[in-house]
Image (spheres, rainbow, N blue to C red):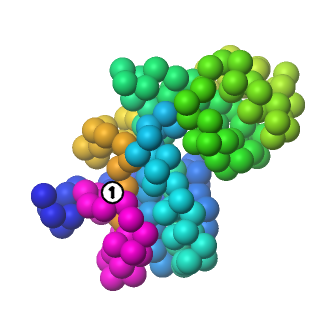
Amino acid sequence: MVDDQLPDLVLPLEGRDHCLGPLGARYSLLEYGDYECPHCADAQPTVKELVRELGDDLCFAFRHFPQPKIHPRSAPAAQAAEAADEQGKFWLMHERLFANRTDLSDAELRTLARGLPLDMATFDRDVRSGAPARRVAADVESGTSLGVVATPTFFVNGRMHAGSHEFLPLLDLLRRGRTP
């Protein structure tokens, strides 16, 4: 299937999204990802390079799409990222979760949080509150409604992308693609 036959992003990037770069940027790249997914981890250097290359011309957003049947610790990891976000440390936790994707036990999630550093009483309270789980579920629901079935799934300038996750093809698509 070619990209122009794939669905458009019907839920546009908004303030609730975790974004690097301005929401009104010239280009947008949205990833639905899973912290235990090896393919998502492999895509992270490309994403970082695109963010560096395009600067404020790119809004990169990340939405959670844990796949607990194949990655049993992906949902708790996503919830830990959301709890870290409550203390302004989403992107730091995001990086650490991918770097430690082979050990996302409860103990390791707490170790990662403590090392950011986060206030651990607040972190634990936020995780127990259920708000992170609801946020993750909302991301999964939005992804499912758009036809996301695997990770990583990227939307390039508002259109689902089924091709390469390599730097140059994505950069080319971003630069010549339409905006949402």
Depth check: give the residue in front, 95 or 133: 95
Choose top left, top right, bottom left or bottom right for residue 160. bottom left
**Residue at 25% across, 43% down:** 147
Depth check: give the residue in front, 124 or 111: 111
Q: Position of residue 89 (x, y in %)?
A: 74, 45
Q: Is 166 part of what is drawn in magenta?
A: yes
Q: Is 128 part of what is drawn in magenta?
A: no
**Residue at 68% across, 26% down:** 109
**Residue at 48% across, 78% down:** 26
Tell me the magenta residue range. Answer: 159-180
Above or below: residue 122 compared with residue 22: above
**Residue at 37% across, 55% down:** 154
Quadrant containing the N terminus in the rendered view: bottom left
Quadrant containing the C terminus in the rendered view: bottom left
Q: Position of residue 104 (x, y in %)?
A: 60, 26
Above or below: residue 15 compared with residue 117: below
* Amino acid type at mark 1: Leu
**Would residue 129 be visible to someone looking at this image?**
no
Q: Position of residue 158 (x, y in %)?
A: 35, 64
Above or below: residue 168 compared with residue 33: below
Depth check: give the residue in front, 118 or 9: 118
**Residue matched to label 1:** 9
From the viewer's perspective, is 168 left or right of 18?
left
Q: Position of residue 174 (x, y in %)?
A: 39, 75
**Would residue 33 be visible to someone looking at this image?**
yes
